[in-house]
Amino acid sequence: MQLKISKIMVRRTVLPAVLIILLGVTLWAFKRNATDGDSKEQMLLTAIGTILEQKHYAPKTIDDNFSKQVFAKYLEALNPDKDIFLKQDVDYLKKYELTLDDEIHNAPLLFYPDASAIYLKRVGEAMQLYKDILSKPFDFTTNEEISLDNDKADFPADEAARKELWQKRLKYLALDQYTDLLQQRSRNMNDTAWNKTDAQLEQMARTKVEAILDRSFNRQKLIFTPEEQFNTYVNVITDLMDPHTEYFPPVESRSFEEDLSGRFYGIGAQLKDDDGAIKIAALITGSPAWKSQKVQVNDEIIKVAQSNAEPVDVRGYAVTDVVKLIRGTKGTEVKITFKKTDGSTQVVSMIRDEIVQDEQFARSAVINEPTGKIGYIFLPEFYADFERQDGNRCSQDVANEIIKLKSANVKGIILDLRNNGGGSLPEVVNMVGLFVKQGPVVQVKDRDGKPTILSDNDTSVLYSGPLAVMVNEFSASASEIFAAAIQDYKRGIIIGSDTYGKGTVQRTLPLGKPLDMFSGQTEYGTLKLTFEKFYRINGGSTQLKGVTPDIALPDPLDYLKVREKDQSSALSWDQISKADYNEINSGADWDALETASKNRIRENTAFSAILKNAQWLKENTDKTYSLNLQQYQKEQAQLRAVVKQDDSLSRLTTPMNIQPVAQDSAKYYSNADSLKGDRYLQWLKNIQKDIYINEAVNVVKDINEEH
């Protein structure tokens, strides 16, 4: 899972000094280790290796043991399903197993080009293999099973073993498609188009599987360039230090900054994958694409060119690949070749302009209850646009939403941080300050120094009423800092499930010379480096353990292994001394609130069923699957019934009365961008039926009843 981490997760006052130190290391590494015969990749890898060893919070020694891990992880990164390489390939490549630490220390780069060349050769063989297998019918009456647990598997011993592996996996994929087609035929018995025999449906299933694999493999052959091979290799190395240290080549670095700031420079078109073709799904009103009057919904993108450069044929690319090519620096030209719906082609030249992703910013609504109004704030991430003085920052945006809600006379506020993967540390500190009167928020420690306490120094409090904070397993990093601070102060009550457990701090380090004066991009991209850990003000770390909510709600995804503790390279948990702070006497009886909520949950048939289903899913995943049609249908019917029931149970039968605040009415009901307005209204409908928000409402009402 990719968590969004701020490029500046420390106070702004210490940024220049730290950047000078780190940049000094980078330049030293390039100069000291570079020779006339060194390639760009060698210099870059050696520089990154030096930074990892000298500046990472808890660096692993880059030695023969580390080399063995890189060796195994790179092969796994290329072929996680272990169905491309043969054992003989691995045996041949073992000559590099103990030399990769030397490569990081400036020895010639031999392993990843050799491994990648073998991989691409085997990909070609695999494509022919699956086409041969899919050309013949499958027999779904035999009693076979397949295990999809690749961690316990090894690479095939020979070509015969690889063919047997592909035979089973393709049969499984075709069986899944065939089962779906049987269901569609059953639902459309009166439609002559579905007047097909079982044999015809089986052939359709194989055709669908082949088309899916063709798109996947052809894309891999297109994008797995020597540059991408190197990037993958470097990220195997950085990931072994910890899951959040990562190398971004220039284009990926730009995307990372765009995600954090909520702004990018592009043409303002939403793209979609239409059976392998990348098409225009929607246009943003006022954007370059919209203004051109030449771009229409359902136009297919064939080629993308940067100004007068040679165009890149993007047929076979994924949406994310095409987006990276279309976005760029403000004021630059992009030329896109479209295939129109009438079959003609047209080249459209557009000048990139700023596109603001305001749908990723904080938003609020009012929940109307018989006992009074309750405010709801949704914050998808802790974003911060540090490049502009007037750039959006989540702490200020949340403050604005609080002001709107206060004007609506709400009697409590729910802050929803579910699925919020984190972001800017300074913004967390500022945001806690909206609810707490002056005091420590989080402790930060590098590998050598004593903890530094980051505090809110503003004595004012914007909102002092009842507060509930919603979290789940995808609430990470900055979300956990906020929830932990609110919990330690007893300022509000935390509701949901155990959070992700990311307690490390990253900073982005630019590598190489700047590409221009405006974008901040550099010639070699960016290294996102873990250089500190953060701790709660009570002294405990959120690393691995996360934040345990005051009120636990049944979690339908609890069976998934997606938290930090499930990552093999995650750093360990520890604790430091408690900071000097005082709990806030809110007058609420936390034990009574928890007891009341537990009683409601226990008596709620929906929550009881979700809890039961979560346990069933935990016991019935990561197992073998039958390739017999009748048994497979039985297993899938059970699984789909549970998933469908969870989806239904999580929605209230009678929606809550939730409306946007008066100041935002136009955004929902008369938006100039009608598609965006529709999305806002759909969001409103979704939260109106959310059973988890409903329980948070009940908890806030309980708090009010105590006062």
Image: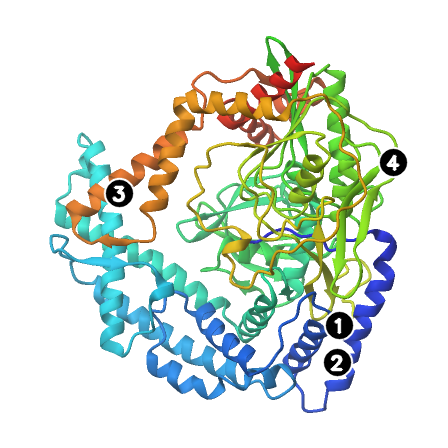
Q: Nearer the viewer, mark 4 or mark 3?
A: 4
Mark 4, other Cα within 10 Å: few <14 / some 14–19 / many ≥20: few
Tags 1 and 2 in contact by the CB under 8 Å rule? Answer: yes
User: Which residue appears at 24% of the width and 71% of the height?
Assistant: 163
- What's the CA distance linking mark 4 and mark 2? 43 Å
Q: Nearer the viewer, mark 2 or mark 3?
A: 3
Q: Nearer the viewer, mark 4 or mark 1?
A: 4
- Mark 3 highlights which residue? 636
Question: Is 559 on the left or on the right of 163, as rendered?
Answer: right
- What's the CA distance linking mark 4 and mark 1? 39 Å
- Mark 4 highlights which residue? 458
- Mark 2 highlights which residue? 30
- What's the CA distance linking mark 2 and mark 3? 55 Å
Which amino acid is tagged 1?
Answer: Gly
- What's the CA distance linking mark 1 and mark 2? 9 Å
Residue 512's disc number = 1
Residue 213: x %, y % from top left: 34, 60
**Counting residues from the N terminus, which is met first, the one under dot 2 or under dot 3?**
2
Give the secondary structure at mark 3. helix
Question: Is 352 on the left or on the right of 693, as rendered?
Answer: right
**Counting residues from the N terminus, which is met first, the one under dot 4 or under dot 2?**
2
**Counting residues from the N terminus, which is met first, the one under dot 1 or under dot 3?**
1
Tags 4 and 3 in contact by the CB under 8 Å rule? Answer: no
- Quadrant location of residue 218? bottom left
Tags 1 and 3 in contact by the CB under 8 Å rule? Answer: no
Residue 340: x %, y % from top left: 48, 48
